[in-house]
Image (spheres, helix red, strand yellow):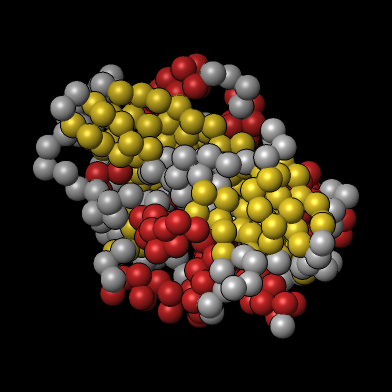
């Protein structure tokens, strides 16, 4: 059997690349620094009293523009991984509420990480968690990957790096300089998130709101998502701060910025007499929103053994961009190996 291909990152890009190669008969190893798959499609789970609850505190929904991704989403819907998210969606501009109609959104259930978890489960023993790749080097015609303490993870025929652009640039600097330069050209805006649970559903006229100005950019009722409805337990809400507000408060502790976001939630149009939550937690997404994608090719491969880059930072700030980039990188690597 051939040596495997290394995939760095078990977010949607990495798992799309891994699944594409695995389907073509290529052995793969996916290495992820976190405890589970998902990246910004992660789901946070909490035990609130007698209720086990979850919060989708990163990416909020899926939409398809690319025809290939549309077919993939159709398959996910047939397999009941995703379903249309129906409800009262609004856009808030100042004190004005504007209903958003005709824009179909999809969400996985029971958590946003459902898709990544399904693909990770298919790959099973080929995925390694809590492993951070700190160095790549070439030896004997193979990519040698090592962790921060110098432990060798393995020797690989090729590699695809799907970490955020700045992290990819740091990892590939001196090893694949053209790819490092391309990755370094990307820029991100941070996003602070707050997860709030209330004993009873707050008096809110809508289930999700996109907000034009102010501290918050998006608010959603987690319980309203398909597959998230629970007959018992608290009412769960996700608050996302605007990129400007997030940048201003990124150095604050979650215990500081989360209550400020909750206060902003209570002041939105359509929200009345917001009670104190039974649970409130904040989270920092430092690499949340791609502001500038790489200036180079989305499927560029450099060197022998070949190395490729992938991620939404290669194509655009959307879930589908992450998927499409991973698939294209996998195809480019396979072509370079044949």
State whether residue 126 is above or below residue 189: below
In the rendered image, residue 105, in percent from the top left (x then y), is placed at 37, 62
Q: Which residue lies furthest to the left in this view?
A: 231
Q: Residue at x 38, y 58 (%)?
A: 121
* Front-lying residue, 247 or 110: 110
Residue at image location 74% in from the left, 53% down from the top: 144
Q: Nearer the viewer, residue 319 or 76?
A: 76
Coordinates of residue 278 in the picture (x, y in percent):
26, 21
Relative vertical location of residue 241 with respect to residue 142 in this rendering, above or below: above
**Left or right: 257, with 190 as reference point:** left
Which residue is depicted at the point 59% across and 73% down? Answer: 1
Question: Which residue is at the front of the view, 220 or 311?
Answer: 311
For the C terminus, give its image quadrant: bottom right
Horizontal side of residue 128 vs 228, given as left or right: right
Question: x and y percent of residue 30 in the render?
Answer: 56, 56
Q: Where is residue 93 in the image (x, y as percent from the top left)?
A: 47, 44
Q: How many marks?
A: 0
Decide if residue 189 is in sight here.
no
Q: Is residue 30 above or below residue 252?
A: below
Q: Looking at the image, can residue 132 be seen?
A: yes
Quarter location, residue 142 = bottom right
* Residue drawn at point x = 18 percent, y = 31 percent: 51
């Amino acid at each position: 059997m051939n040596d495997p291909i290394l995939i760095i990152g078990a977010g949607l890009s990495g798992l799309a690349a891994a699944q594409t190669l695995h389907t073509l008969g290529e052995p793969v190893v996916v290495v992820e620094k976190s405890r589970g798959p998902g990246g910004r499609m992660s789901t946070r789970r909490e035990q609130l009293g007698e209720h086990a609850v979850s919060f989708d505190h990163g990416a909020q929904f899926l939409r398809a523009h690319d025809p290939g991704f549309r077919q993939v989403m159709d398959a996910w819907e047939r397999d009941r991984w995703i379903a249309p998210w129906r409800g009262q969606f609004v856009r808030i501009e100042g004190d004005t509420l504007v209903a958003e109609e005709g824009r179909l959104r999809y969400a996985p259930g029971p958590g946003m990480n459902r898709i990544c978890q399904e693909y990770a489960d298919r790959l099973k023993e080929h995925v390694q968690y809590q492993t951070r790749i700190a160095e790549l080097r070439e030896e004997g015609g193979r990519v040698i990957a090592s962790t921060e303490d110098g432990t060798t993870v393995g020797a690989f025929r090729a590699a695809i790096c799907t970490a955020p652009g700045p992290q990819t640039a740091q990892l590939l600097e001196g090893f694949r300089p053209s790819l490092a330069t391309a990755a370094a050209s990307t820029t991100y805006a941070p996003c602070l998130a707050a997860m709030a649970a209330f004993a009873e559903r707050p008096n809110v006229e809508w289930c999700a709101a996109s907000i034009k100005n102010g501290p918050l950019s998006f608010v959603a009722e987690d319980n309203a998502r398909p597959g998230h409805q629970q007959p018992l337990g608290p009412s769960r809400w996700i608050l996302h701060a605007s990129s400007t507000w997030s940048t201003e408060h990124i150095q604050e502790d979650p215990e500081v910025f989360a209550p400020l976001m909750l206060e902003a939630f209570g002041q939105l149009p359509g929200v009345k007499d917001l009670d104190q939550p039974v649970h409130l937690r904040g989270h920092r997404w430092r690499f949340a929103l791609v502001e500038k994608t790489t200036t180079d090719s989305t499927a560029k491969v450099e060197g022998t053994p070949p190395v490729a880059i992938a991620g939404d930072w290669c194509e655009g700030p959307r879930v589908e961009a992450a998927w499409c980039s991973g698939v294209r990188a996998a195809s480019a690597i396979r072509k370079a190996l044949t």
